[in-house]
Amino acid sequence: MNDTRAIQTALENRRSIRAFKPDPVPEDLLAEILKAALEAPSWGNVQPYRVAIASGDQAIAIARELNAKFETATRVRKANLVTKLAALLKGGVKPDGDFNTVIKYPEELRARYRDTGMGLYGVLGIDRADTAARHAQMARNFSFFGAPTALFIFCEENLGAYGALDTGAFIQSLALAAQERGLGTCIQAALATWASPVRTRFDVPENYKLICGVSIGYPEDEPVNSFKPKRRALSELTLKAKA
Ligand SMILES: Cc1cc2nc3c(=O)[nH]c(=O)nc-3n(C[C@H](O)[C@H](O)[C@H](O)COP(=O)(O)O)c2cc1C
């Protein structure tokens, strides 16, 4: 029988995966997923995105470099002024990503961000006051949550917001195509904090900017993977017409 609600089911079942099995993603399967994602709509069909695929040793090397940067940046943030200046002069600490990944949320969005974070830590059994455990969880971003492959997504800069819009449609298509094939994904802005570990290893055109990473692999059977953060009510989504 034809599953006429396949898209509805896929949308409801897709979740960010934050615990992966180490099993590699077969190259042909990944190619199939990327090809499916290329069906996404884009402004003038220009498809203003490029993808750096990091697997195996390449993924391990990038993860190692990102983790080192994250640990150093955290240490420096907590250090005194002299240590901070010394680290800045030495270089490699400050984010060198193409976009700012540290967002100051407007009041309206802050509560939702906080609730999602608290919900996630709750499922992971991490106390809000346990800064070491929170730090360790944040650090897992840079090891792709154990995924064997990370996709680094670049977006053409001249299209401005429309390039990012197109890239978003591409990424969601990619996530759903992966899910249909038994794979999980986590879209991660954290992976765009530092661009140099990827730029030094891939031939990235200057006009393509690193917008995020996507960890991809087979999901572990862990509670964190079934965490389902709440969505807006429709009444909060739609705008009221002026009287
Ligand atoms: C642009 C973007 C950036 C994100 N960055 C991160 C990230 O750095 N780390 C992370 O764990 N999740 C990240 N996420 C996942 C979101 O937290 C997640 O999509 C949201 O909480 C909704 O949960 P769901 O994807 O499971 O439905 C990001 C998602 C998007 C779309």
Image (spheres, grey):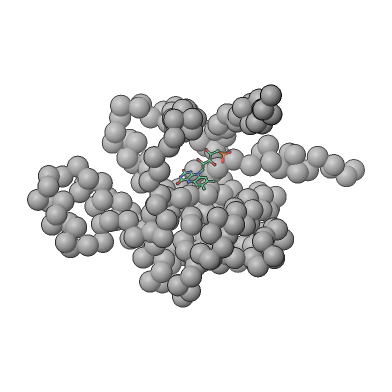
The structure residue drawn at horizontal position 17% and vertical position 63%, both measured from the top left corner, is 90
The structure residue drawn at horizontal position 9% and vertical position 50%, both measured from the top left corner, is 82
Q: Is residue 67 above or below residue 235?
A: below
Total tally of numbered discs in the picture: 0
As drawn, is 155 to the left or to the right of 81? Answer: right
- The quadrant in which the N terminus is found is top right
Front-most of residues 44 and 110? 44
Q: Position of residue 179 (x, y in %)?
A: 65, 49
Q: Outermost residue, left direction? A: 82
Q: Is residue 51 above or below residue 140?
A: below
**The quarter of the displayed image where residue 12 is located:** top right
Front-most of residues 1 and 13? 13
The structure residue drawn at horizontal position 52% and vertical position 54%, both measured from the top left corner, is 214
Q: Position of residue 215 (x, y in %)?
A: 51, 53
Q: Is residue 81 above or below residue 9?
A: below
Q: Position of residue 94 (x, y in %)?
A: 28, 56
The structure residue drawn at horizontal position 29% and vertical position 33%, both measured from the top left corner, is 131
**The quarter of the displayed image where residue 171 is located:** bottom right
Front-most of residues 104 and 146? 104
The answer, for residue 55, to whether it is visible in the render is no
As drawn, is 140 to the left or to the right of 187? Answer: left
